[in-house]
Amino acid sequence: MAQQTLTNANEGAFDYSLRSKVNANFTDLYNRATPARQSADVVVDESTTLTNLTGLVATLAVGTYKFRVALQCLATANGGTKVAFVYATPTSIQCEAKAFTASAVAVTRFTTTTSAASIVAATAANICIELEGTIVVATAGTIQVQGAQNVSHADETTYYAGSTLEVYQIA
């Protein structure tokens, strides 16, 4: 959408027309897009095969992006969690991953030039996972967040609806 501008003629009452211009540019003001939301729970048991987390996908043009993933999850220490990105041709992904249990946080740093097969691989009772970092994109495409169990076990690992993926271009 073409950016709308405010002029001196807009001084005075904050009417519908002016509010519409401000709202139309809200994303531009903060350089952020609406987060992608996971639309359904994804339950994994007895499987380490990565599965797309429904709705946690973004289309990226060539450029540099900042991303943040907030996964609400529940896993036992028997199965744990495994989280990945699938992307055809990134130039680089650099990421800090935080995996939360009820009483501790495990923090790791991750760097790759291909799809990120295992950003988080923890056999722990995780309740939340946060990923933050940058991705440099050389060829336009989509990035998809995936989840699985770290160790195949009958206990369920659940990635909950409402988890989010935020991606916005910084260069």
Image (cartoon, rainbow, N blue to C red):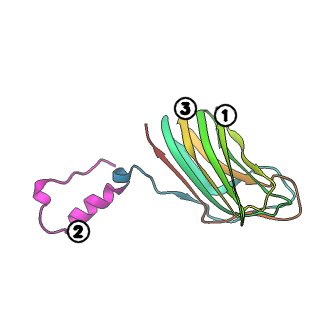
Q: Tell me the quarter of the image containing the C terminus.
A: top left
* Residue found 54% across the figure and 41% down from its top: 134
**Mark-to-mark CA distance, 3 and 2:** 41 Å
The residue beneath circle 3 is: 139
Side (left or right) of 80 relative to 164: right
**Mark-to-mark CA distance, 1 and 3:** 12 Å
Which residue range is magenta in the image? 1-26
**Mark-to-mark CA distance, 2 and 1:** 47 Å
The residue beneath circle 2 is: 16
The residue beneath circle 1 is: 114
Give the residue type at disc 1.
Thr
| Quarter holding residue 139 | top right
Query: Picture coordinates of residue 72 (x, y %)?
Result: 65, 63
Badge 1 vs badge 3, beta-carbon distance below 8 Å: no
N-terminal label among 3 and 2: 2
N-terminal label among 2 and 1: 2
**SS type, badge 2:** helix
Depth check: 68 or 1 in front?
A: 68
Give the residue type at disc 2.
Tyr
Side (left or right) of 133 relative to 103: left
Query: Picture coordinates of residue 56 (x, y %)?
Result: 61, 54
Give the residue type at disc 3.
Thr
Dot 1: few (<14), some (14–19), or many (≥20) neighbours within 10 Å?
Answer: some
Depth check: 10 or 79 in front?
A: 79
